[in-house]
Amino acid sequence: MSKLTVALVAHDHKKPELLAWVHNHIEIMKQCDLVATGTTGGLISDETGLEVKRFKSGPLGGDQQIGALIAENRLDALFFFWDPLNAAPHDPDVRALLRLCSVWNVPVACTPATADLMVTSPLFLSSEYKPIKPNF
Ligand SMILES: O=C(CO)COP(=O)(O)O
């Protein structure tokens, strides 16, 4: 059974929340191929020992690299703890990444609560479940 490819991204003020969340679900994360934006990925691999493929930092194009995975149907889920209280210089990239999740029906969680519900769903690791890809 091929592993799910899962992207982990957090803005600076949300990194502690994402790190705690990864610790809480580490056994599930171990069963996934993890990718992340640069700083988030470095933090997660340093703090958890998980192997994480790191793209560029978000403001330098990392969000767009993850968006490209979605466009190529190579991403199964996104956990993106974005910061609703601070403006980001790369807000257009953030919006573009979230937009592509909606375009291609990719499961995306932006809060720890949604992320908890998503990974604990029996469908999450099930090879039986494949989200329908829209046919444009
Ligand atoms: O800015 C980000 C997502 O928009 C995250 O980037 P970093 O993981 O490099 O901090």
Image: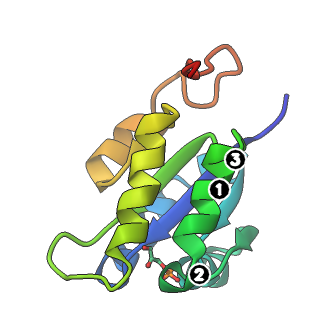
- What residue is shown with label 2? 47
Pick the residue in front: 79 or 32.
Answer: 79
Label 3 element class: strand
Badge 3 residue CB within 8 Å of ligand 1 = no
* Circle 1 crowding by C-alpha within 10 Å: few under 14, some 14–19, many from 20: some
The residue depicted at 18 percent of the width and 69 percent of the height is: 84
Badge 1 residue CB within 8 Å of ligand 1 = no
- What residue is shown with label 3? 5
Q: Locate residue 43 relative to residue 30 in the image: left or right.
A: left
Q: CA distance from mark 2 to mark 1?
A: 27 Å
- What residue is shown with label 1? 68
The residue depicted at 51 percent of the width and 37 percent of the height is: 106
Label 1 element class: helix
Q: CA distance from mark 3 to mark 2?
A: 20 Å
The x and y percentages for residue 62 are 58, 74
Q: Would residue 91 be visible to someone looking at this image? A: yes
The residue depicted at 19 percent of the width and 82 percent of the height is: 86
- Could you tell me the amino acid type at mark 2? Glu
Extreme-top residue of the structure: 128
The residue depicted at 67 percent of the width and 13 percent of the height is: 128
Mark 1 and mark 2 in contact (Cβ < 8 Å)? no
Of tags 3 and 2, the one toward the viewer is 3
The x and y percentages for residue 48 are 62, 74
Pick the residue in front: 16 or 94.
Answer: 94
Extreme-front residue of the structure: 136
The x and y percentages for residue 34 are 68, 58
First-in-chain label (1 vs 3): 3
Q: CA distance from mark 1 to mark 3?
A: 13 Å
Q: Residue 42: which quarter of the image?
A: bottom right
